Amino acid sequence: MAAPFLHEFTYQAMCQDLLPIHNGTQYRYKFQSSAGTYEDQVATLSDADEIWVKLRHLHMQDAIERLKADFAAFMEENAGFAGKPGQSSVNDMKDMLANLPQFKEMREKFSLHLNMAPECMDKYQNMHLEDVAKVEQACATGKTPEGKTPKGIVEDMVPLIADRTLPSRDKIRIIALYIMYRQGIPDEDKRRLFEHARLTMLEQDAVNALTLLGVRLKRTSADKDLKVMKQKPEDDDYELSRYHPLVKTMLDDHISNKLDPIQFPYVRNAPGPSTPMATPAPVTASTTSLRSARPGWTAKPSQKAVVSKEAKQRLIVFVIGGMTYSEMREAYVMGQKKNKEIYIGSSHIITPVEFMDDLKQLAHQGMGSKALPNGLQYQERSYQEAYEQKWWTRDPPPRPRPQPRPQPGPQQPRPGSAALAAPAASPSSSSLSAHSSHSYDGRGEKEKKKKRHFFG
């Protein structure tokens, strides 16, 4: 549960957390043209961008160094546009890009990442993320950078959450990680943390909703420590990137056949102890005489799939309820390190901001959240009702019958137009009175007499 709350400092995760990227792919920035003017540009982050593919899983410091090296190599290939010696900063490279009108495609790609990387670093400095990340890493790993048990987390945490300049979403992340590190705290301590952080009721709901996801919020003296999966520290980790999502530990144990079958039970019969998880052997082509063999172009394609000589073991991981960019990175890195084909997927990709927004609505059955805007709307029903609701198509309603056209009634005089009113009936104009709306003839009197006689 710690992965959605942590500040990640790899390139893709940091950009998705700090920058306004729409739907995870669309990023708007200022592009400097060859004329020196700035234009609004919308870039798409996808696998079609070679620079994005190279940098997205690197730590931000390594990504900036790689970006500088690639830009220097690009300038060396185009020696006529080489800049002055000593221009190695990101801002200097942005100025040099304006003088490359011939290479529009590469110019736009470099310009995109030369805008994204400095913007992330500016927010890193302005939002005091170094101090925030130290507390987050201590809570998530349970260790200091020296490998010892942290002792001064509260002293480092309280000034941060009391800082008015720190956004409330970062305070929620710190408090949530601290509660998970302590495996629950007394209600009075939680109330004091909320007061120091000045959280609203809706922001407090985001923290309290963690209990619906299996997190223990309240702890008493009788509660025991919960069993958690321990992480293996690595020597090449940055101090502020020591935590690795549990997907890494799970994949590592699964490949080495050490995964706990209680936490991750088999959905089918478990393999025997003599069934190691080995990489399939490469397929060797059979030697056949060219004289006796039939031409290959006359044979129909076989139904059997042709296995590549470099076939790798394939692992498929599906995370229910959303996965983070850090978990996606671990799958990529583990696949390259272990020489495996690892596919990771989920119902959707979550960022820390979106995850906290969903937590705020979780206590209200998800009403108003991005994942479930209409809420759960759960109701008990029989199997037949569920089947009919999913598969039964109702007949369209019958077409309404055409309504008879209303008969044109007598024209009513307009108000104030007495001169246009029909003249009063006179005994001398009996033939015209039959068509007047204010007169009648003797037939109506006879009909009335008949009706009285009929009912009488």
Image (spheres, rainbow, N blue to C red):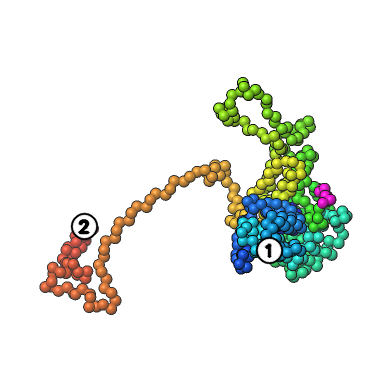
Task: Name the residue beneath numbered marker 2.
Answer: 454
Which of 233 and 413 lies nearest the eye of the viewer? 233
How many residues crowd mark 1 within 10 Å: few (<14), some (14–19), many (20+)?
Answer: some
Callout 2 environment at 10 Å: few (<14), some (14 to 19), or many (20+)? few
- The answer to which quarter of the image holds residue 187 is bottom right
Structural distance between the alpha carbons of marks 1 and 2 = 108 Å
Q: Which three-letter amino acid code belongs to the residue tagged 1? A: Met
Badge 1 marks a residue whose secondary structure is: helix
Residue pictured at 30% horizontal, 56% vertical:
404
Q: Report the magenta residues as a range.
A: 230-236
Give SS at disc 2: helix
Question: Which residue is under mark 1?
Answer: 96
User: Which secondary structure is most common in the magenta stretch?
Assistant: loop
x, y percent for residue 290:
63, 24
To which quarter of the image does residue 64 belong? Answer: bottom right
| Residue 297: quadrant of the picture | top right
Of 191 and 158, nearer the camera is 158
- Seen at 82% across and 57% down, the residue is 239
Q: Does residue 190 appear in the picture of this structure?
A: no
Q: Is residue 46 magenta?
A: no
Q: Which disc is residue 194 wearing?
A: none
Position of the C terminus, as image quadrant, is bottom left
As for residue 232 lying within the magenta part, the answer is yes
